[in-house]
Image (cartoon, grey):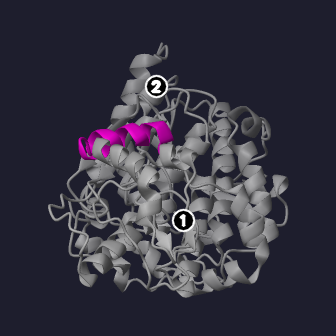
Amino acid sequence: MPASRLDAVYRSLLLTKFFTKGWGKPENLRRIFEFRKIVANREACYNLIPTNYPVTITKDEEWSDCHILEGSFQSPFDQNLPGLMPEETRTAYFQVVLPRKWESQRVKPICLHLAGTGDHFYWRRRNLIARPLLKEAGIGAILLENPFYGLRKPKDQIRSSLHNVSDIFVMGGCLIMESIVLLNWCEQQGFGPLGLTGLSMGGHMASLAATNWPKPIPLVPCLSWSTASPVFTEGVMSASINWHLLESQYFADEVYQNDLAKMVKVVTQDDAFLAGQHFAKHYPESMNRMNKLKKESIDSDRVVTADSKSEQKMSGDKLSRGAHSLTDVQNNKNSTDLSIDNNNDHFKDNTDNSKDKTKDTVVDQARIDMEKADALVFPFNLITSKLKFTDNDVLKGVCALPVTKHPLLSDSKWREREALQFMRGVMDECTHLKNFEVPVDTELIISVCARDDAYVPREGCMGLEQIWPGAEIRFIDAGHVSAYLLHQKLFRSTIVEAFTRYMKKYPVNNS
């Protein structure tokens, strides 16, 4: 299905820009990457936070249809990584929506709702999700204010425009640890069962929080997926990022390239899985390509022209990991002198075996092979938007693997793409669910996704069902914006269903 046009139009109308000051200090990124390894360990992260962590209740009010509490506490993230959080963000604020009277003194279900992008203060979650959910199913709610939002927004920040890429990781680390504080507090107050949910970015943050809770917990992430990487590199929000600034900073300081880039890794599906998937998808062409590669390796001397000075090489382990072969691209001293093997069974049958090829045919095939190699470095859709081809199936099934600088790319385009790859790496490092532990009971997870979501692209990303076997993935026929506007009732009913699953699997004595 095509990505939602409404998503693109809506995003184009918003003024919010992201990462207006760049990546953030390299030393801060280094500390975050190192601390991520601790946060990714459930036991280690949970043990950083005392179960009786001090929480202060600042408001206690009876409303016409509910009981409202408000409170605050110092973020444990700031205690573990001091100096990274702006002063305004260091105090966590939350609101609790409870029934005026519980139907049972033993069963007091509460769900922690984490905020999506741009969701400042409590009113939106309270009125769209929390109060209706309380009325429909008797499930209370805790609404945690995101760092950098609402009461925690730095004075010099405009709307939701985070200044640095590092800020999104600070936000995530805060919400993981602050969720543990609130879930522990709920247990001390006698509330339970406890659950986690959120929409869009809030759904992903809820997923991260669930990985560090040491007990079974209902989880309903809505309109999110397994990583934030495609949101900022491929989705419609990527157009709100000043890529020129990020590129300039990346190449101005060698620390990004020499040190930080080595600390992160783009997460892909298992290499062996990709190999089998690619081979099966393109059989028998894939078998033909394997045979062709063997022949090319034997006849390579006859293919290379006499004045060829260098050859792009690829190690055998990269070939096996990519699960497909590339026609070796010969890089001559003069970039116009390219000798390409035009008999390429992977792309199309070529009935003309004559050596007397026209110049145009050679150039076309060269461009095909060049783009094919280029696709090893960057996402398919980004490459095809820059290098246009008449054959739409040219790159079908080509996987992404790193190679050396590509001869068809200018220095500026290569720099742009290298900065983009660094963004993919840092986002996967800190947000990809594969880098965190699996929740205790994945059968309590129901993920609701928009099939035509242009904010959260899923193509090429590892699926939740692969990372969390047993989790249920549901799709609605909508884009990101239309799903948010039209399917709030569905989100609420899914939360109720997840709590019902918990009660059936882990019954509580209601006497």
Tag 2: residue type? Answer: Ser
Q: Position of residue 444 (x, y in %)?
A: 43, 30
Tag 1: residue type? Answer: Gln
Say if residue 389 shows up in the picture. Answer: yes
- Marks 2/1: CA distance? 71 Å
The answer to which of 357 and 474 lies nearer the viewer is: 357
Q: Position of residue 184 (x, y in %)?
A: 67, 36
The answer to which of 28 and 413 lies nearer the viewer is: 413
Q: Which residues are magenta?
A: 269-286
Q: Where residue 312 is drawn, which disc sits there?
A: 1
The answer to which of 112 and 66 lies nearer the viewer is: 112
Is 390 located above or below residue 144 in the figure? below
User: Which picture quadrant has residue 20?
Assistant: bottom right
Within 10 Å of the Cα at label 2, are there few (<14), some (14-19), or many (20+) other Cα atoms?
few
Is 435 located above or below residue 236 in the figure? above
The residue positioned farthest toward the left in the image shown = 351
The answer to which of 138 and 157 lies nearer the viewer is: 157
Q: Is residue 9 left or right of residue 301?
A: left
Residue at horizontal 65 percent and vertical 59 percent from the top: 93
* Residue that label 2 marks: 104
Say if residue 20 shows up in the picture. Answer: no
Q: Where residue 227 is drawn, which disc sits there?
A: none
**Is 85 a magenta residue?**
no
Secondary structure of residue under mark 2? loop
User: Which picture quadrant has residue 258?
Assistant: bottom right
**In the rendered image, which quarter contains the N terminus?**
bottom left
Q: Position of residue 260 (x, y in %)?
A: 74, 64
Residue at horizontal 78 percent and vertical 41 percent from the top: 49
